[in-house]
Image (cartoon, rainbow, N blue to C red):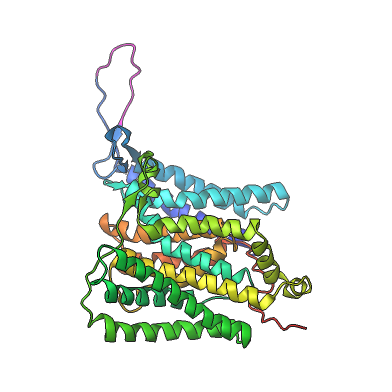
Amino acid sequence: MKITRTFIFSIVFLLAGGLLLIAALQRTNEIVPYRMTTLPQHVVPSVAFEAPGVTTSILRFPNEDDSLSFNLEIPTVSYSLIVALLFVGVGTYGLVPLQNERAQRTKTNGLILAGILIIPTVLILAAAGQSTNMISMLGASFRLGTPIIIGAMAGIWCERSGVVNIAIEGMMLTGAAFGFVAYTFVTASIPGQGGLWIGIAVAVASGGLMALLHAWLSVTFKTDQIISGTVINIMALGLTAFMRREVILNADASFETLSEFSIPLLSKIPVLGEVLFTGKPIFFSMFLLVILTHVMLYYTRWGLRTRAVGENPHAADTLGINVQRNRYINVIIGGLIAGLAGAWFSLETAGGFRDGMTSGTGFIALAAMIFGKWTPFGAAAGGLLFGFSQALDTRFQLLNVPIPVQFVQMTPYLVTMIVLAGLVGRATAPKAVGQPYEKE
């Protein structure tokens, strides 16, 4: 039997289902029946069961309009048994050596279903005996996924033109630092939130300057693009630490962030209105960037040329496309977008700057881009998945889940490794990505 991705995930779900089944069966031993009471003749007698301990999880869906709010109460033991049997069944079927195409498709669909069920299962088990607010959980997933999704868009612009950009992390960090520095200088002279908007503009521009350096090294001088990106990341760490020590710590700046607002009418939509249409400016720009990137790549002449340069620059050159100029412009656009993602940290969320505050978000954004197979909507889905894993970290701590906090904090990075190791499938990068172009 070949060790394939299907085989590995079948084993994983088989083991997970077995462990969950054992745990659920142990809890059923605690369940005791109610005493039967005298009922009218037309009512069929039944036996209700209860457990002396925890038996239900309550998922809350609140809304500003109380009439639209509801709670979903789920019996934990029964749910665990059903999911455990499903995991065992999917895992067992995945190990059966059937080679026809229909069987393979069924195996894949079963594994996908089991994978989707992991998220609600984790939440239900974590909330056993308690209640958890699903709206705030979903909202936190979108907001924590904002810099990841924006960073993934930056990576798509670069890599679709054939330039590897692992410097997204450094561009984000530079944008976060220089944007906040600009804000500290103008905050006293500009009333309201004008200083924050100037800070955002400087953050975007600083990300673009770092991208210009990356393009200069990798396109003009044909430096190895991985080395160029690594140099920028290291330089950004040192430069931003120096700026914090010499400028920010000595500055007298208020810790202010961009104001939140709601989109009229749309924010009143039940459930999703509060999540998607109430937020801050950079959060809303995330949706615009995903749509704009998709439209530009697939419905414009520039997008067609960019994809041609990323796939076959020699053929593009013979058609009159200036390969180097195209790559320069796309890398700089990617840097501008990464700078905006950096502004999310310092100007929209934290209201300040600390050393290394991006905490590897740029690398997770690259993972989201690969997860989405270099497509905007796919990368956005990957960013939302990683945002959910970060929100899960906070939710576990609020629910007092008996897991060491260090393991909980590893969740986003574990999700990144698992996704890249197995869930992505065959992700084919643009053929010319990472290859310097020599004009013949």
Which quadrant would the C terminus be assigned to in this image?
A: bottom right
Which quadrant would the N terminus be assigned to in this image?
A: bottom right
Type of secondary structure dominating the magenta stretch: loop
In the image, the segment drawn in magenta is 38-48
> Is 173 placed above or below 124 here?
below
| Residue 299, position as x, y percentages in the image | 65, 55
Number of marks in the rendered image: 0
- Comparing 410 with 355, the one in front is 355
Residue 402 in view in this figure: yes
> Is 159 placed above or below 371 here?
below
The structure residue drawn at horizontal position 65% and vertical position 64%, both measured from the top left corner, is 302
> Is 110 placed above or below 150 here?
above
- Comparing 262 with 48, the one in front is 262
Residue 407 in view in this figure: no
The structure residue drawn at horizontal position 66% and vertical position 49%, both measured from the top left corner, is 105
Please identify the residue farthest to the top as the structure is shown: 41
Please tell me whether residue 41 belongs to the stretch shown in magenta: yes
Asked which quadrant contains residue 321, the reply is bottom right
The structure residue drawn at horizontal position 61% and vertical position 52%, both measured from the top left corner, is 108
Please tell me whether residue 383 belongs to the stretch shown in magenta: no
- Comparing 306 with 25, the one in front is 306
| Residue 65, position as x, y percentages in the image | 29, 36
| Residue 62, position as x, y percentages in the image | 30, 41
Please indicate whether residue 417 sits to the left or right of residue 273 in the image. Answer: right
Asked which quadrant contains residue 46, the reply is top left
| Residue 247, position as x, y percentages in the image | 28, 83
